[in-house]
Amino acid sequence: MSEANRDPNLKPICNLVNPLLTDMYQITMCYAYFRTKRHDTHAVFDLFFRQNPFDGEYTIFAGLSEVIAFMSNYRFTDEHIEYLKVQIPDATDEFFDYLKSLDCSQVKIYAFKEGSVVFPREPLLRVEGPVGICQLLETTLLCIVNYASLVATNAARMRMAVGPNKTLLEFGLRRSQGPDGGVSASRYSYIGGFDGTSNALAGMLFGMKVGGTHAHSFVQSFSSLDDLTTRLIELPGREETVDLVDIVLKYRAQLEWEHTNSGELAAFISYCQAFPHSFLALVDTYDTLVSGIPNFLLCALAMYEVGYIPIGIRLDSGDLAYLSLEARKMFREIEARFNIKGMVQQLKIVASNDISEETLYSLNQQGNSIDTFGIGTHLVTCQNYPALGCVYKMVEFDGLPRIKLSQEIKKVSIPGKKRIYRLFGRAGFPLVDLLLLEEEVKSHGEPKQGERVMCRHPLDPTKRVICVPNSVVELLELVWDGKPTQDPPCPSIAEVRGQAMKELNNLRHDHVRFLNPTPYKVSLSEDLFTMMHELWRTEAPIAELT
């Protein structure tokens, strides 16, 4: 793609994403292709995964926008070339001239919509073009798609655990794998169904809602009410002040809560003064039930009296289910005693503290009164399944289908240039994703509504079903043809999130349930199955026993 046609605003978020972000063997392979004058031979590669993560039966595809940005800016710099000359001293000057001239103008990429629900063995990306450049793209594309799809899926599973009405906030920046991991986790957890992040940079880059309160250190910095630099707070909408401390102490005396930690109370008063419209207190610095929640309620009562509406509390330790129920009970008692209508509904309870997907299901079973979950470590590090395992395999070379065999049957690849169709049943749910050869679609047409179609298991010849679809949707779209094919080149992050939520909600419950989910069918057409297994037979060496 010429410099004149390049979109200056379409750049990878991470400045490390460039042609040199690859495994060295991709470059040495490219040189081997170049030496034998095969580097311009047309090839097709599929990027796919073999197993859904987290013991589940679905995955959310993410990272496509970053792929498009990477492709748009694919250029080896002079510095890259000089470095590679040292690393590959046997390579010719002509090869380095070739690398210097490379861009993605001869490459095509077909892909699922970003945010789509996807399944094992189906190509998330189909990459076509000269084998030299397509080979060089492998590692970077895998790096972009693997983590993005894993985090989005992890987030989606947590969204499914809490349901549509709870708020989910990503709190993982401090626990993420480096700065890029932190920003990527914020971005892709939003796509998977989270509502916002604590990451200020991600909020600026992606237009995400940013949230946060304060840390224990803020509370610890106060020892007594004498540490307050002012006792006053401005009344809402007026240039008039009142003594907030006097009002707080009035309620403290009425409720006989003089036992609470005075330094913590001072910290909460100071935070009310700084953020009168968004007062939310971390209540577990000393003792949640004995001090933290009572001190919060003293400040909340004072804020209601002067005309502000406080937000609520955050629980960061202890028995979250029990503490949330006790907190709501205390809210209810205060609402009744002081006749503050709507207080119980207005005050929100935020919970954090090393929350995982399993924790969310456990909290559901225990019963709780939590409105918002702040989730960090288990979300961004994906502790239960640290890598998605996407692979990038050649499926066609110079017009001929190619297959990768293995003694592990699950690692046998599906050859040929393929198209994918999602077949829906009468109830509106998807039944099966069907892979067909491109040539067979050109010859015989696409699967059609109401017509019987044989669907074969890719690896087991005894497993097959006949499907009569009520509707059919093709899944792979041409997103890159030497340049972005869509305008705008990439959807907004909110549109991608909407795509993910729509598709998740359209799956049968048994496919997305937490325990023993039903596998979703990914099948081959009769022609593709026959071609694959014939190629498998002809390419497999015959052992000789003596």
Image: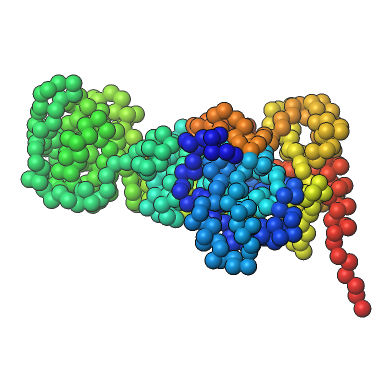
Q: In this view of the protein, which residue sits in the foreground, 160 or 424?
A: 424
The residue furthest bottom is 546
Compared across the picture, whether 308 is left or right of 329 comes to left
The residue furthest left is 226
Q: Is residue 161 something that shows in the picture?
A: no
**Which residue is pictured at 65% across the width and 36% down the height?**
481
Which quadrant: the N terminus?
Answer: top right
**Which residue is pictured at 41% across the width and 35% down the height?**
208
Q: In this view of the protein, which residue sits in the foreground, 29 or 341?
A: 29
**Where residue 326 sits in the image (x, y, percent)?**
32, 41
The residue furthest right is 546
**Where residue 77 sits in the image (x, y, percent)?**
51, 52
The residue furthest front is 93
Give the image quarter of residue 214.
top left
Compared across the picture, whether 40 is left or right of 232 comes to right
Q: In this view of the protein, which residue sits in the foreground, 370 or 184?
A: 184
Q: In this view of the protein, which residue sits in the foreground, 173 or 20?
A: 20
Q: Is residue 284 something that shows in the picture?
A: yes
Compared across the picture, whether 540 is left or right of 502 comes to right
**Which residue is pictured at 13% across the width and 51% down the height?**
223
Give the image quarter of residue 278.
top left
Compared across the picture, whether 247 is left or right of 105 comes to left
Which quadrant: the C terminus?
Answer: bottom right
Position of 188 relative to 472 (above/below): below
**Where residue 327 sits in the image (x, y, percent)?**
31, 40
**Which residue is pictured at 26% across the width and 41% down the height?**
281
**Where residue 368 sits in the image (x, y, percent)?**
41, 41
